[in-house]
Image: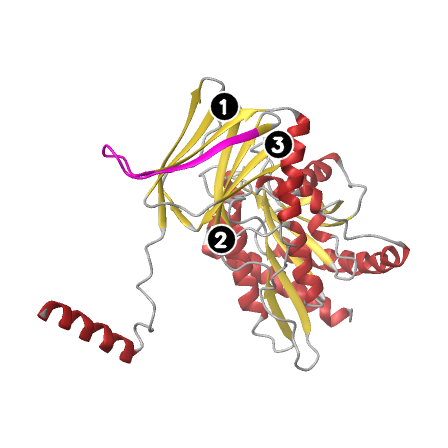
Amino acid sequence: MVRRFFRASLMLLLMCWGVLQPGTAPAAPPLEVSAVRLGLHEDKTRFVMEMSAAPAYDIFLLADPYRIVIDLPQVNWNAGEGTAERKGVIENYRWGLFKKDTSRVVLDVAGPVKILQAVTLPPASGKPWRFFIDIQKTDEAAFRAALAEHRQNQEPEQVALVAPPPTEARKYTIVVDAGHGGIDPGAIGKSGVYEKKITLAVSRKIRDLLKKNPKYTVLMTRDDDIFLSLRERVAVGRHAGADLFVSIHADSISRPDFRGAAVYTLSENASDDEAAELAKEENKSDLIAGVDLSAQDDTVQGILIDLAQRETKNFSVKFAEMLTPEIARSGMKVRGRSHRFAGFRVLKAPDVPSVLVELGYLSNREDERILKSGAGQQNLAEAIAAAVDKYFETVDP
């Protein structure tokens, strides 16, 4: 009885101090995924996750290409980096933070499939909680029917802005877009560094430099390790009424001798084969993260939007031409034909001048060394900030 009285008194004191609110309990520790495995069982393939507790989850199918998506609360992933080893109908899997408080697992599957069951097993025989799904081949008609049912029940997608549009006196609004993130790591460097980490580090430095100038309002599409679809990135710039959109990336290529930065602006006709291939790879970001590509509509529609975009492209080109010499002065080599054109979806806002900056090649040891170093990142950020200053001193979009 004394123990119960002491416990009740302690809870009352904590409420008075504001540590606990009435009707609340201490926050539960985050879920942990400790192991993942694939198994073959007669005519089905099983995907298993060992976890620290029973998860809440949402499972759905995606087409073109065929994928299974498992959404979970945000988890600590201690099960390795995934596997490319095919087993049964599962060709590969990947995981990562999809949005705030949501982790996502994406299974690439070999064709139309159906989910036979999703099961959560409590701890037993020395094993932790286990969550598994059983998958089986099916025909195209059954797959499409399951896909249509999910889309019918889905809530309309809401695009959340990182910050509200400015309401104070006229400023130039600049959106800095750190490429990739969350479940989409981007390119992987020689040392194993992820592009998403490089782009976020440089983008934060650009933001901090630009915010020192009172005439700029600076927004970031993401300020942590989270996934944003290409459409959401474009929407941040458009909703903010941005005067400039700068998307930061770091390339990778099969030739380790290739190095140097390049700046891209939008054109449906790529300036060369390399630019076309790069745009194709960057535009796969939504596919990698398990976004329903059928729901993506073209930002560019109609004659009036096309006319607006022509003027926007001209502003984009002006900024690109100011940016490349600044990067060259930063110590990073600049590629020949350093201003290029390609059909990057993230540049398709018809009313926001936009460029995509490839800071260098993570597949090249010298470029990677610069991109990983704090000094190299700072020099590149200063180069981009200097180009922004020159741009707005010259033009008034």
Location of residue 240 by image quarter: bottom right
Q: At x 49% / y 37%, what residue is drawn?
A: 94
Q: Position of residue 292 (x, y in %)?
A: 64, 43
Q: Position of residue 208 (x, y in %)?
A: 53, 67
Q: Earlier in the sequence, mark 1 or mark 2?
A: 1
The secondary structure type at the circle numbered 1 is: loop
The secondary structure type at the circle numbered 3 is: loop
Q: At x 58% / y 64%, what residue is drawn?
A: 162
Q: Residue furthest right?
A: 303
Q: Which residue occupies the foreground of this view, 156 or 348? A: 156
Q: Give the residues drawn in magenta, as a range.
A: 114-129
Name the residue carrying label 2.
225
Name the residue carrying label 3.
66
Q: Which residue occupies the foreground of this view, 73 or 286? A: 73
Picture disc at residue 342: none
In this rendering, would 353 be left or right of 183? right
Name the residue carrying label 1.
86
